[in-house]
Amino acid sequence: MRRPTAQDVADLVGVSRSAVSLVLNGHGAGNIAPNKQKAILEAAERLNYRPNAVALSLRSQRTRTIGVLTWPSVGGTPSLILRAVLNSATRAGYVLIFMDTGGDQEVEGQALATLRDRQVEALLVIAPELTDYRPPEPMMSIPTILVNCADPQASVTSVVPDESGAGAAAAQILVDAGHSRVGILAGSPDAVQTRLRVAGCHQIIAAADMAAETQFVAGCDPGSATVAARTLLEQPEPPTALICAHERITVGAALAAAELGLRIPEELSLVSLEDGEQLACQLAPPVTTIERPDRPMAEQAFSMIIESLDSAETSVKQVAFVCPPVFRDSVTAPRSRQSRSATASR
Amino acid sequence: MRRPTAQDVADLVGVSRSAVSLVLNGHGAGNIAPNKQKAILEAAERLNYRPNAVALSLRSQRTRTIGVLTWPSVGGTPSLILRAVLNSATRAGYVLIFMDTGGDQEVEGQALATLRDRQVEALLVIAPELTDYRPPEPMMSIPTILVNCADPQASVTSVVPDESGAGAAAAQILVDAGHSRVGILAGSPDAVQTRLRVAGCHQIIAAADMAAETQFVAGCDPGSATVAARTLLEQPEPPTALICAHERITVGAALAAAELGLRIPEELSLVSLEDGEQLACQLAPPVTTIERPDRPMAEQAFSMIIESLDSAETSVKQVAFVCPPVFRDSVTAPRSRQSRSATASR
DNA sequence: CTGAAAGCGCTTACAG
DNA sequence: CTGAAAGCGCTTACAG
């Protein structure tokens, strides 16, 4: 049972397929006799006719398809970004083809070639954590937007979070709560994301003349984070608050606090960054977080794609999104600041 | 700068575009003069010619495109499944178009229509947790495979994990370690996945004549899981081991154990299920897990798709994958079984 | 007001 | 051995 074509509809009514096309595309008025219009509409309905998108693409030279290059893999792509991009695309009548770069030039080149063969109208490159990304040569000829990664040479438009701002915001929350000794649990020391987040923290910490110590957790895994947090917390003069650069690290910090019998927030305040996996917000108590605005970034990127397609305007932009704080229950004034009676009353 | 077509290559060499097509598709031998063949190959290379996949699709009536319907959203789809499916597709020369069902009949219908318009050759429906899935009528006319969900009426082929087997395997590990009082931390009480996992546990527990108590954690979130675990652990005769039906629950259990000063595994053994987000394996100590075989399931599903495309064979199958145990460091014999000296030596 | 033609880019029979 | 034609399904000028 073959899919019906415009010809089938035409045959059923007894008109040419141009007439069918005209009517179905709303150009019937003044071109096709009203009674034939009606007949065509009915026949199309009855046959459940829908135009073949492939033929349409060939004819119109518009595929309404956008390629998504995930770096290094779809698996790692933040779920909110994925969802928002797909959502936006669907709403705009576009379809998305996903391909992994594998974090490998060779694989990426292949993927890019496939996408071009498929005549994608634009490209979205998405990374799981803020990274530098150098677009390969052939990418230059397709409208491209980088999400959560950026080209150091700024040859392509990018949408990124303000990571150092996020670090600063986290530190500021602790300063505001009255802390003066904080620990920083950061991610991989050589990641640009880590560098930025830590730098943001230090900027506020320095301005506030606070003491701070940083531990790096290479894999951002809870296990190593637990160990790192313990190191910080078992010092003679331990920090009264911890900034965790990633939700998985936050889990580790919470674990270390629990082991040490430190109650959150009374005896230890916690601020998390990112939380794309929704872990920090689901701990007990829920952790105050400087969120990465995955959804807004994705939506912005997508609308910029659509714009560039419609206007053929090609100026390169670098959009940085502020990471908004979400206040929850993991931060309070440090214990030393609390009145003796308050402490005793527990 | 338009993309070069076969005609451009033909013009450059001075032959017809049929000749170009013949040579480029390896049908030159015996049809085209050797020197012309060489010239065509060179010209194609020089122009960087690659056939237009859209035109190819229209001509061959094969799009080499597979639709992926994510239920309810790509965001929730297990990353390993996503990655494996994409990987398989790429390797097989197929391309994937993703669409969300939104968990909504209306949205799903739209998505399905779009996918059909795009002439996808087959469909993959993927769910984040084992669920019942009733394929809508129009899906019946496209080769479809359900991943991590199944049609109760078995009208469509599905690939699922053996969830009750997973529960049983978890319980068996604890039986083998000598436990006789276990707690079960399950997910949403009304989810079919939960029902299966718990049933699997109980089967072994009953056979071993063990005591067991179950707590449901509706959202599978660490916070609620912590509370639930505490409830279990603060009883007069607490369980010596916990089965956690999901990695997020495992995090909560670890947190409760830490708060209560219970060392893992010496004072409390832990077994996790699933761990698609790689949390259980990254705790300290790493937790013994009955993994859901996401990658094998995805690969199987994909190869079945390809098969059904090639052979036009249409028998419905229901494939269930065993969930393999991964032994790590969170299980040991219960304390009461340990010799007194062993306990004292700490 | 209507149908026939051209053409998007490709490949595969089919004449010569 | 080679080129011209047909046709995948569609739409948009273009004759009548």
Image: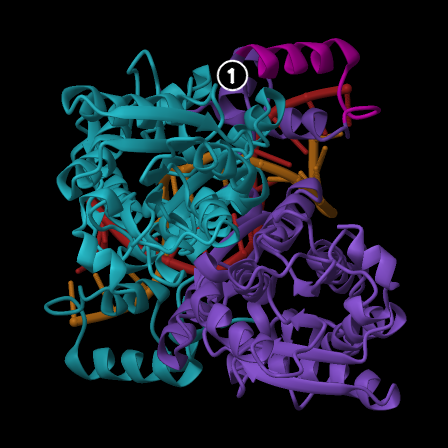
Chain colours: A cyan, B purple, C orange, D red
Horizontal and vertical percent position of residue A174: 21, 39
Horizontal and vertical percent position of residue B26: 76, 28
Q: Identify the secondary structure beneath mark 1.
A: helix
Residue to which mark 1 is pinned: B11
Q: How many marks?
A: 1
Q: Residues within 10 Å of mark 1 (few under 14, many from 20)?
A: some
Is A179 located above or below residue A330 in the figure?
above
When asked about the image quadrant of residue B165, the answer is bottom right
Is A205 positioned to the left or the right of B94 in the image?
left
**Magenta residues?**
B28-46
Is B21 located above or below residue C15 in the figure?
above
> In terms of depth relative to the viewer, which is nearer, B294 or B153?
B294
Is A313 located above or below residue A268 in the figure?
above
* Observer able to see residue A125: yes
The residue at the point 73 percent across, 56 percent down is B330
Is A260 positioned to the left or the right of B336 in the image?
left
The residue at the point 35 percent across, 18 percent down is A151
Which quadrant is home to the C terminus of chain A? bottom left
Which quadrant is home to the N terminus of chain A? bottom right
Is A232 located above or below residue B112 in the figure?
above
The residue at the point 67 percent across, 91 percent down is B153
* Observer able to see residue A328: no
Give the letter of the chain under mark 1. B
The residue at the point 37 percent across, 73 percent down is B107
Horizontal and vertical percent position of residue B342: 85, 56
**Residue B101 on the magenta segment:** no
Horizontal and vertical percent position of residue A205: 22, 25
Q: Amino acid at mark 1?
A: Asp
> In terms of depth relative to the viewer, which is nearer, B57 or B103?
B103
Q: Which secondary structure type mostly characterizes the magenta part of the structure? A: helix
> In terms of depth relative to the viewer, which is nearer, A99 or A80?
A80
